[in-house]
Image: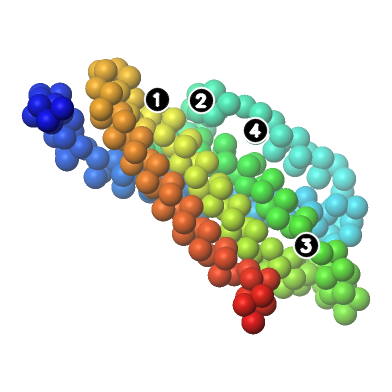
Amino acid sequence: MFDYFKSDTFLEAMEIVKSSFPLAIVETIYVTLISTLFAIIIGLPLGILLVAGEDGKILKIPKGVLHVINVIINLLRSVPFLILMILVFPLTRLIVGTAVGTTASIVPLVIASFPFIARLVESSLREINPNIIETAQSMGASPWEIIIKVMLPESVPSLISNATIAVTTILGYSAMSGIIGGGGLGKIAINYGYYRYKYLVMALAVVCLIVIVQVFQSVGTHLATRCDKRLKNRKK
């Protein structure tokens, strides 16, 4: 067993870890966080519109508009990510200038993720007690005041929990983007593990991905717990 740690295979794997893993980890976190940010910027308003515009209870939005939003979200969510990456090559080239590379992978990641985030936001907002919204309306609050001062604050713990789910999902997508040269740990796992049969390198890349997921999950759970008013009231 100890001889294995002196073998050429192990020593070569360690050399790859030292030379390539630090940059790959940074690239993975960079792509994940930036993609999540843009996906939230697009998905959060869509999720709010789907809930606030339903039956005109808060916002007066034509049913046709809501139907179009639902169809777009459902269509994008139904396309497998690997296929979506290829389909959006022209858009990626238009925005970034190339369809290959770490930054280029952000475009398909955002397109694949914002519908998912919109559904998560919709789910979080639907958990709000309707009586709270009705009370705000009876007090004369405007639709945007209800959204900004009532709906979003009341759903913060759920939104944070769902954002954590989104981050870990996007992290998984970013690993798949290594197939098109997306960079990061996914690229290392595919280039060395799949193409060159260096399974130890691939295993180490997977371990790194698992550690990053656990870190994101722990931070998200901690923030959601701290923002949960119900837990604070129980402690009191």
Residue farthest bottom in this picture: 236
Q: Is residue 172 above or below residue 59?
A: above
Mark 4 lies on a secondary structure that is helix
Decide which of tag 3 and tag 2 comes sooner along the chain: 2
Q: Quadrant of the N terminus?
A: top left
Where residue 33 appears, as percent x and y from the top left, is 45, 51
Residue assigned mark 4: 76
- Mark 3 burial class by Cα count in 10 Å: few <14, some 14-19, many 20+: some
Judging depth in this view, the residue of 38 and 161 nearest the camera is 161
Instruction: Examine the image and state in which quarter residue 80 appears.
Output: top right
Residue assigned mark 1: 179
Inspect the image, locate mark 3, and give the three-letter code of the amino acid beneath it: Ile
Judging depth in this view, the residue of 96 and 52 nearest the camera is 52
Inspect the image, locate mark 4, and give the three-letter code of the amino acid beneath it: Leu
Task: Name which residue lies at 40% across and 26% down.
Answer: 180
Where residue 48 appears, as percent x and y from the top left, is 73, 56
Q: Is residue 35 above or below residue 16?
A: below
Instruction: Examine the image and state in which quarter residue 197 appears.
Output: top left
Mark 1 lies on a secondary structure that is helix
Residue assigned mark 3: 128
Instruction: Examine the image and state in which quarter residue 201 appears.
Output: top left
Whether the residues at callouts 1 and 2 have beta carbons within 8 Å, the answer is: yes
Decide which of tag 4 and tag 1 comes sooner along the chain: 4
In the image, which is nearer the foreground, mark 4 or mark 3?
3
Where residue 217 appears, as percent x and y from the top left, is 48, 52
Decide which of tag 4 and tag 2 comes sooner along the chain: 4
